[in-house]
Image (cartoon, rainbow, N blue to C red):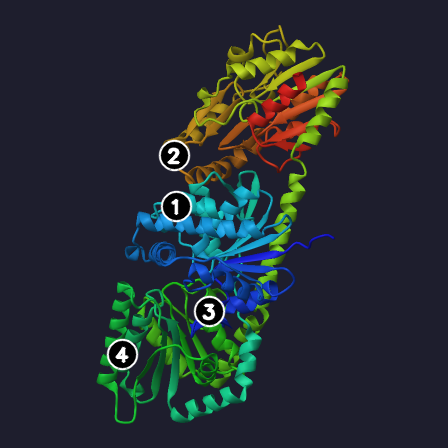
């Protein structure tokens, strides 16, 4: 019987509430949007959801809870109070939450929090690996588990892992303030697909990852440890049908009528938030106060319904915020209230989904103005509840939802005056304009719902894995190496083309430090000892260096990508008809860029110039390289030159100089029965393309190439060459 592969969802909390009544544990499903959306996955087949059950369960009762949860396809990770305090309350909520919401001054970089965070992520990994089989897909959720993707990847290198972050990802300048930033990025890069709510968040992540790890970005793909990691925006939706149904529910309709009756002739403005400093609650109250102060004609005409859901109010920062809200609401009500009218109706409690649905339906205006928010689903729930296509949404540009719901009145939450103007515009908006805006927003909320979000993410994860596999089929694994070795053994006349930097030796920031070592000399001597072998070192280095390093060996050399050539036991010869007259003009331009770019330098060869930026600050080098390319594009075309961007270099050379042409010259009139070519740079692509299809062409370090196969690094190259000579 073939076991079906499954999907494993992992989040900090399981999608159920567990309560203890008279010593018996009761389970009730969670109302959250994520639980709804992922229900379609974890409730099916043998799929599972792994997470913390939300309460501390004594050891002797853990088995009982595990059994109860198993009936719902849920697997618990039990955490002690200490672990929750350090990992969740500590690292997640006192470091990651404030930093990711740009409130760095609230962060408390405590070493013990980091230790707890690592330990709990490790605990989650153990729970996952116990249930993991080959072929399974994993989907990790949110900032509490940033280390988990890589922890799982280390155990199971070929597993499929998706990760989604539900809060913003900050710009590099903010993110780098976290002392453990490299470890966090490395943890996240364990995933194959990283999802964020907005393109801005995805861009910030790519920027941080390319500066804090060895990953190389190309658009929205990061090449990390020979694996493509795709970073993409997936704006999360809501279960719009649920809100549609609720609004038609008789119980809800009754609520709605009574709310509307109690607020006759008064415009109601609704706000719903969890108690948090990222939600902009105080600024919103200040805006209302300013409105009533400067436009007294609105006194008695509008009311703010403010629901604040209790959260972490034992934490000093949150308690302080609650006290400030209480005080400000009290002041506004004391100043402006009349016998029959109250400006702010303030509720510090949570309500049933039915009551929320009624108030969404009844409110004329919904005011959603967080200082920072990953998405903000309240705005979408309000839109989904407006069956008559009326009502006005005022939305902060700092919420992810503002990128989709652009028919809302978009405000900057730091600008109190801006919010006042939007409130006045909303109060006076004509029914026709309300309909037009709401209709368009309802269409978006209905199309991009939670089910499409889940589908888009899972489809993309599959696509990423297929892309990785289509490129990975080329890795020269054991069977391919055996095939190369056999063909080598049976051949009578062999040509072996070897690039130098990055192929036979590792990549070094100082180009003069990459001299050959004893092991390499030994391999080359073994290769050249066999009379059937023609070994050719084909490199971009200048001929003087190659002569110094390899002149004493029995091999051919091609230097400066083909500008200089030397058969064994003869002298070096330049390619005929080459000119270096162009160099002065190009060098003047490169000099100005070198003066403006600390860490860059020019390497001059007889028929080419190379601008190196491997020591330049990350990002600046690539920017300057683009400027140089744009600056010199016309000159290059004019003078019949070629400009070649490589690994942290740009090379300028005569168009006739090309490793591919040089390799073809070497093979002219020859008919070898075995050809092997190894290279790591895109100058080596010319050789791969020039050789016939049956030649063994091998790209080193990357799996995106015209070569037939690839090897991970120079160590794998040396192993292959040793196997040939043995």
Q: Is residue 205 above or below residue 252?
A: above
Label 2: few (<14), some or many (≥20) within 10 Å? Answer: some
* Residue 73 image offset from top left, x and y in percent: 58, 63
N-terminal of the pair, mark 3 or mark 4, is: 3
In 3D space, how far apart are the residues under numbered discs 2 and 3 (Cα atoms)? Answer: 59 Å
Instruction: Name the residue that disc number 4 marks.
Output: 329
First of labels 2, 4 by sequence position = 4
Secondary structure, mark 3, is: strand
Query: Hey, which residue is sitting farthest front in the picture?
Result: 60
Q: CA distance from mark 3 to mark 4?
A: 34 Å
Q: Which numbered disc flags the more N-terminal residue, 2 or 3?
A: 3
Q: Quadrant of residue 294 in the image?
A: bottom left
- Label pair 2/3, CB-CB below 8 angstroms: no
Q: Residues within 10 Å of mark 4 (few under 14, many from 20)?
A: many
Question: CB of mark 1 within 8 Å of CB of mark 3?
Answer: no
Numbered badge on residue 18: 3
Mark 4 or mark 1, which is nearer the start of the sequence? Answer: 1
- SS for callout 4: helix
Give the camera-side residue of 91 and 297. Answer: 91
């Amino acid at each position: 019987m073939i076991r079906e592969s499954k999907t494993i969802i992992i989040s900090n909390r399981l999608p159920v509430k567990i309560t203890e009544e008279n010593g018996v544990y009761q389970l009730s499903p969670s109302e959250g949007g994520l639980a709804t959306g992922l229900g379609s996955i974890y409730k099916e087949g043998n799929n599972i959801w792994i997470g913390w059950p939300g309460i501390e369960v004594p050891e002797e009762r853990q088995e009982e809870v595990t059994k109860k949860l198993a009936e719902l396809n849920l697997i618990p990770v039990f955490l002690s109070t200490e672990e929750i305090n350090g990992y969740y309350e500590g690292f997640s909520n006192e470091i990651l939450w404030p930093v990711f919401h740009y409130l760095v001054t609230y962060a408390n970089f405590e070493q013990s929090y980091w230790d707890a965070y690592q330990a709990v992520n490790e605990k989650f990994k153990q729970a996952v690996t116990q249930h993991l089989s080959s072929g399974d897909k994993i989907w990790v959720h949110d900032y509490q588990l940033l280390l988990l993707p890589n922890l799982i990847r280390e155990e199971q290198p070929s597993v499929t892992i998706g990760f989604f972050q539900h809060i913003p990802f900050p710009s590099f300048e903010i993110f780098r303030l976290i002392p453990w930033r490299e470890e966090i990025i490395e943890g996240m890069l364990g995933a194959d697909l990283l999802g964020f709510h907005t393109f801005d968040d995805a861009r910030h992540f790519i920027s941080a990852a390319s500066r804090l790890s060895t990953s190389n970005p190309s658009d929205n793909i990061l090449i990390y440890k020979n694996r493509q990691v795709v970073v993409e925006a997936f704006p999360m939706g809501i279960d719009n049908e649920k809100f549609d149904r609720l609004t038609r529910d008789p119980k809800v309709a009754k609520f709605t009528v009574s709310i509307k009756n109690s607020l006759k002739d008064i415009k109601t403005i609704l706000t719903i938030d969890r108690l948090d400093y990222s939600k902009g609650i105080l600024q919103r109250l200040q805006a209302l106060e300013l409105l009533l102060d400067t436009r007294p004609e609105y006194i008695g005409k509008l009311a703010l319904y403010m629901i604040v859901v209790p959260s972490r109010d034992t934490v000093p920062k949150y308690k302080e915020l609650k006290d400030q809200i209480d005080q400000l609401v009290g002041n506004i009500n004391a100043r402006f209230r009349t016998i029959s009218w109250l400006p702010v109706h303030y509720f510090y409690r949570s309500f049933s989904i039915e009551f929320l649905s009624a108030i969404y339906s009844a409110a004329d205006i919904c005011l959603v103005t967080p200082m920072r928010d990953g998405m903000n689903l309240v705005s979408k729930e309000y839109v989904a509840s407006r069956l008559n296509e009326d009502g006005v949404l005022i939305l902060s540009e700092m919420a992810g939802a503002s990128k989709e719901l652009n028919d809302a009145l978009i405000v900057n939450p730091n600008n109190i005056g801006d919010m006042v103007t939007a409130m006045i515009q909303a109060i006076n908006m004509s029914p026709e304009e309300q309909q037009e805006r709401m209709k368009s927003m309802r269409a978006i909320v209905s199309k991009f719902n939670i089910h499409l979000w889940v589908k888009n993410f899972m489809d993309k994860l599959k696509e990423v894995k297929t892309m990785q596999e289509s490129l990975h089929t080329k890795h020269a694994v054991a069977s391919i190496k055996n095939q190369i070795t056999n063909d080598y053994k049976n051949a009578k006349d062999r040509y072996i083309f070897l690039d130098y930097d990055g192929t036979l030796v590792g990549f070094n920031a100082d180009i003069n430090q990459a001299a050959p070592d004893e092991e390499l000399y030994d391999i080359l001597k073994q290769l050249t000892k066999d009379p059937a072998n023609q070994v050719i070192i084909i490199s971009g280095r200048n001929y003087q260096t190659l002569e110094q390093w390899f002149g004493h060996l029995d091999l051919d050399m091609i230097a400066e990508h083909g500008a200089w050539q030397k058969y064994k036991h003869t002298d070096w010869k330049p390619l005929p008809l080459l000119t270096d007259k162009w160099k002065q003009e190009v060098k003047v331009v490169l000099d100005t860029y070198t003066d403006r770019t600390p860490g860059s330098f020019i390497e001059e060869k007889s028929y080419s110039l190379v601008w190196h930026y491997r020591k330049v600050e990350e990002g600046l080098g690539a920017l300057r390289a683009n400027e140089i390319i744009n600056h010199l594009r016309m000159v290059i075309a004019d003078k019949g030159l070629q400009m070649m961007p490589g690994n942290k270099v740009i090379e300028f050379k005569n168009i006739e100089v090309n490793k591919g042409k040089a390799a073809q010259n070497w093979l002219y009139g020859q008919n070898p029965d075995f050809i092997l070519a190894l290279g790591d740079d895109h100058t080596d692509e010319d050789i791969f393309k020039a050789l016939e299809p049956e030649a063994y062409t091998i790209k080193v370090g990357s799996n995106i190439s015209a070569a037939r196969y690839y090897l991970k690094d120079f160590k794998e190259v040396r192993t292959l060459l040793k196997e040939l000579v043995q």
